[in-house]
Amino acid sequence: MVAVTRAEPDWEREFADYVAARSRLLCTTAYLLCGDWHRAEDLTQTTLTKLYLAWRRIDRRESVDAYARRVLVRAAIDEGRRPWRRERATELLPEAAARPDHAGDRVDLLAALAALPARQRAAVVLRYWSDLGIAETAQVLGVTPGTVKSSSSKGLAALREALQDSRTGGTMTGGRDG
């Protein structure tokens, strides 16, 4: 009985090359999904571990990047569901007093992004940061294209509202005052 397999050094070298080329992008995407660099690094490590375990089964004709993004988004959503990971909202960010005015927009955007529900945040990040189309985003999230459109639209509207509130001195409530 002779099994025909690739030599281990070849696939391991391919995986190492992929990690060297894409790990920073994966980590940045993870940061945009969760808003915390430490969690982003953990999510990236989880993604790369799952990718390593599946590397020999992944069809190279399909995009490895798409598979990695799908694993990353699912890991971020799953991690966010754990009760010890839930964050408590505060009216003011601790960094707000110490930051210079020119850095405010970036911090406000990241805070507003972190305040979005997981699906909206994932849709916005995949559509506008990763520059995926509606169909690709739907595939990564495992939802319909209509859900991607709706989540993206709601997420962008919430970001606009939160950023407008932060510029006018209001608080980010995540919803409309009624």
Image (cartoon, rainbow, N blue to C red):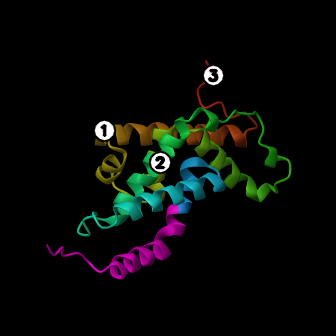
**Element on which disc 1 rests:** helix
Quadrant into which the C terminus falls: top right
Q: Which residue is mark 1?
A: 146
Say which amino acid is labelled 3.
Answer: Asp
- Using the numbered discs, state the Cα–Cα distance from disc 2 to disc 3 in whole angstroms: 33 Å
At x 61%, y 38%, the residue is 115
Q: Which residue is mark 2?
A: 75
At x 35%, y 58%, the residue is 67
Give the quadrant of residue 8: bottom left
Furthest residue in direction top, as rendered: 178
In the rendered structure, which disc, 3 or 1, sits on the residue that comes first in sequence? Answer: 1
Segment tinted magenta in the rendering: 1-26
- Which numbered circle lies on residue 177? 3
Say which amino acid is labelled 2.
Answer: Ala
Q: Residues within 10 Å of mark 1 (few under 14, many from 20)?
A: few
Q: Is residue 74 above or below residue 63?
A: above
- Using the numbered discs, state the Cα–Cα distance from disc 1 to disc 2 in whole angstroms: 23 Å
Residue 13 is a magenta residue: yes
